[in-house]
Image (spheres, rainbow, N blue to C red):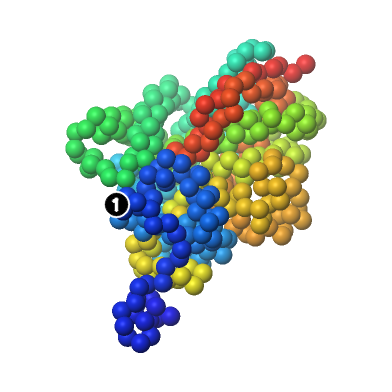
Amino acid sequence: MAAALNGMGGDGRSAVRRRPPGPSGERLLGSLREFAADTLGFATRLAREYGEVARFRLVNREAWLLSSPAAVERVLVENQRNYVKHTFFWRKVDAIFGKGLLTNEGEDWRRQRRLVQPAFHHDRIAEYARVMVDYAIDRVDGWRDGEERDIRHEMTSITFRIVSKTLFDSEVAGDVAEIGVAFDTGIEEIARRIRRPVLLPDWVPTKGNRRYRSAVDRMDRLVYRIIAEHRDGRDRGDLLSALMQARDEEGRPMSEEQLRDETITMLLAGHETTALALTWTWYLVSQHPEVAERLEAEADALADGRPGIEDLPRLPFTERVVKESMRLYPPAYSFGREALEDDEILGWPVAAGTTLFVFPWVLHRDARFYSEPLAFAPDRWTAEFERTLPRLAYLPFGAGPRMCIGREFARMELALIVATIAQRFRIEWASERPIPMASITLRPTGGLRAVVRRRG
Ligand code: HEM
């Protein structure tokens, strides 16, 4: 094997490194055009045609798609220290995320993860259940029976308000709208950057760069001001207070800049994904009236018509619906890593610098793990099914040490919002079937509008 890793045949002749199968693509661009034009279709075809480890080229970058749980385990769990997240994609958006948890690496990341973890302690986030339900009720109170609404917009406004409140507390509610606008601009620019393989550095004054810079500046000003306002030492019960109280082993708090990076990361990571999970859930439920009925019956059975954290064990069907929706439409449809040093994945030698892609979209729709993989079937999620499902065949929140820190927060938020809305409204899709688009997250294009019917 050492010989193969060195690219030398056993007889000493120079040999071509053993490489997984894959398309050769175009001469200069490799598979870039196909990858950019139809990312989901490309990944699906690649896995089907070339198997569990497939190789392709994006211009001069060697990339592999891993579509077996064992291959994914090697990268995200077993030898995860060899696979960094700070890949070519994230480097394009450094100005926004800085060294927040999503993009940080190595010892720095480990220290931060330890510092941030207590802010997501079960008892602390349990306090947020009331906020989640309050804001969902507040939003749908504005809905009129029979009107059309853009469901993605509705869900985003609920989850953005929730993350702002739980992160910063209410005193800054007035700033939320402004942060929202700066964020939208930032997110749009990130989405544009993903699609572009070659990027001019941030300092080049292109129109896109200027827009990006000014959105980042606005976010910075707001977030630094909010941090300053929190300096009175009072624990407001929000996530920022928890981050400010955290101390490492040497008793040091986070720096001002680190607080800024973590806060902006949470704001971004914490609302768009959740809003999309809700949007796809409503889309699927609207296509299956029998599921809508069971969802409503479960929500109606709660004691006082207002879900709370204590009700979560009484919402098993709601949880299965959300789980199944994130199987078919995982908001984080793909994530990537870069190999630091040479390694081996399922017997294939992987060279330092290779980009490894994991597509929950592909794994979640694999007939080896899910019978009738394209069917929306919440009832497949029995305890027995979960026991036999390979561990990494379902990974909407990632896996290994870098698994989503907000997953418990998100699970609670999704179940509570779905139950709150199901008690009050039935959502009927009014437009074309939405097409999943692989942007920074899995967004629906096209049909987003639905008719909301107040329940009797
Ligand atoms: C349905 C909702 C959500 C989904 C689908 C989701 C998905 C993910 C995934 C797949 C990762 C790992 C990415 C990778 O390994 O490359 C991740 C990481 C992360 N998520 Fe989430 N997430 C959700 C909600 C949230 C929320 C509510 C928060 C915070 C309030 C959050 C904060 C983070 C952070 C900080 C990381 C980086 C963790 C680290 O590397 O240490 N996420 N998320």
Q: Residue at x 46, y 63 (%)?
A: 21
Question: Can the viewer see residue 88 in this picture?
Answer: no
Residue type, label 1: Leu
Residue corresponding to mark 1: 28
Quadrant in which the C terminus appears: top right
- Relative vertical location of residue 427 with respect to residue 275 in this rendering, above or below: above
- Give 312 or 29, whichever is nearer the viewer: 29
Picture coordinates of residue 103 (x, y %)?
39, 50
Find residue 319 and report its image quarter.
top right
Question: Can the viewer see residue 60 in this picture?
Answer: yes
Q: Residue at x 50, y 30 (%)?
A: 445
- Give 143 or 243, whichever is nearer the viewer: 143
Labels in figure, total: 1
Q: Residues within 10 Å of mark 1 (few under 14, many from 20)?
A: few
Picture coordinates of residue 363 (x, y %)?
58, 53
Q: Residue at x 48, y 68 (%)?
A: 345
Find residue 316 and report its image quarter.
top right
Left or right of 242? Residue 301 is right
- Give 409 or 198, whichever is nearer the viewer: 198
- Give 360 or 401, whichever is nearer the viewer: 360
- Relative vertical location of residue 220 with respect to residue 28 in this rendering, above or below: above
- Relative vertical location of residue 65 with respect to residue 125 in this rendering, above or below: below
Find residue 430 and report its image quarter.
top right
User: Ligand 1 near label 1 (Cβ, under 8 Å)?
Assistant: no
Left or right of 264? Residue 236 is right
Quadrant in which the N terminus appears: bottom left
Q: In the displayed image of the protein, which residue is found farthest to the bottom?
A: 11
Q: In the displayed image of the protein, which residue is found farthest to the left?
A: 204
Left or right of 384? Residue 149 is left
Q: Residue at x 63, y 59 (%)?
A: 391
Looking at the rendered structure, the secondary structure element under dot 1 is: loop
